[in-house]
């Protein structure tokens, strides 16, 4: 009796029915992601409030960053970030590395979208480890927040996981 080939075929069939592994990170890696080619580094400078984000960062309450130009395509970034014990101050250097691409620390952030007046920006990482909606003011107009959610979705992020701060 040839049970071994039958058992092997049944095992393969059952494995094919198993759910696909979930993508690591916040975005579907099979979805293309694009940075904003028309990004203007000079207009990005100044204060940005974190209006919405993913994961634990939302638990810390209001967070903000100040981007101060230090040279062509370079910034000193200060602000508050969410750490294990709540909000904490940070200081980092950032530099523009391509159209809509900024390296801050060891990570490359992509500016996925900014509205025409640079009131709201969406930034994320190709890895899907990070994404947030930034705003010049603590509150965001509903139409601009909806546009930000659509940009995240277009770039493979699940907008349902986005939490307003």
Image: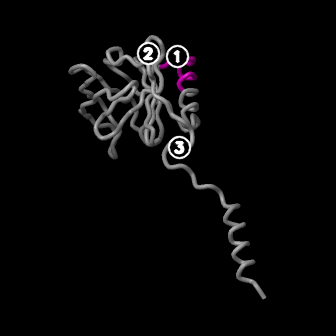
**Element type at mark 3:** loop
Task: Find residue 128 and report its horizontal and vertical position in percent.
Answer: 47, 41
N-terminal label among 3 and 2: 3
Q: Magenta residues: mostly which secondary structure?
A: helix
Residue under label 2, please give it. 119
Task: Find residue 103 and report its horizontal and vertical position in percent.
Answer: 32, 33
The relative height of residue 5 versus residue 13 in the rendered view (above or below) is: below
Callout 2: few (<14), some (14-19), or many (20+) C-alpha neighbours within 10 Å? some
Q: Which mark is residue 77?
A: none
Task: Find residue 160 and report its horizontal and vertical position in percent.
Answer: 59, 36
Disc 2 to disc 1: CB gap under 8 Å: yes
The total of numbered circles placed on residues is 3
N-terminal label among 3 and 1: 3
Disc 3 to disc 2: CB gap under 8 Å: no
The N terminus: image quadrant? bottom right
Q: Label 2, label 1: how many angstroms apart (C-alpha)?
A: 10 Å
Q: What's the magenta region?
A: 140-148
Residue under label 3, please give it. 29
Please tell me whether residue 29 belongs to the stretch shown in magenta. no
**Element type at mark 1:** loop
Q: Residue at x 58, y 32 (%)?
A: 153
Nearest to the eye among marks 3 and 2: give it: 3
Q: Residue at x 53, y 43 (%)?
A: 29
N-terminal label among 2 and 1: 2
């Amino acid at each position: 009796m040839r049970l071994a080939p039958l058992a092997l075929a049944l095992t393969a069939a059952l494995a094919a029915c198993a759910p696909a592994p979930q993508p690591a990170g916040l975005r579907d890696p099979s979805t293309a992601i694009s940075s904003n080619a028309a990004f203007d580094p000079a207009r990005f400078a100044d204060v940005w409030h974190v209006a919405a984000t993913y994961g634990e960062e939302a638990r810390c309450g209001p967070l903000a960053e100040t981007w101060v130009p230090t040279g062509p395509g370079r910034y000193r970034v200060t602000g508050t970030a969410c750490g294990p014990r709540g909000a904490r101050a940070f200081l980092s250097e950032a530099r523009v590395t391509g159209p809509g691409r900024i390296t801050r620390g060891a990570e490359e952030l992509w500016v996925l979208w900014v509205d025409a007046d640079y009131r709201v920006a969406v930034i994320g990482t190709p890895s899907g480890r990070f994404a947030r909606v930034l705003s010049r003011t603590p509150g965001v107009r509903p139409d601009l927040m909806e546009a930000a959610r659509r940009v995240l979705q277009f770039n493979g992020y699940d907008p349902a996981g986005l939490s307003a701060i």
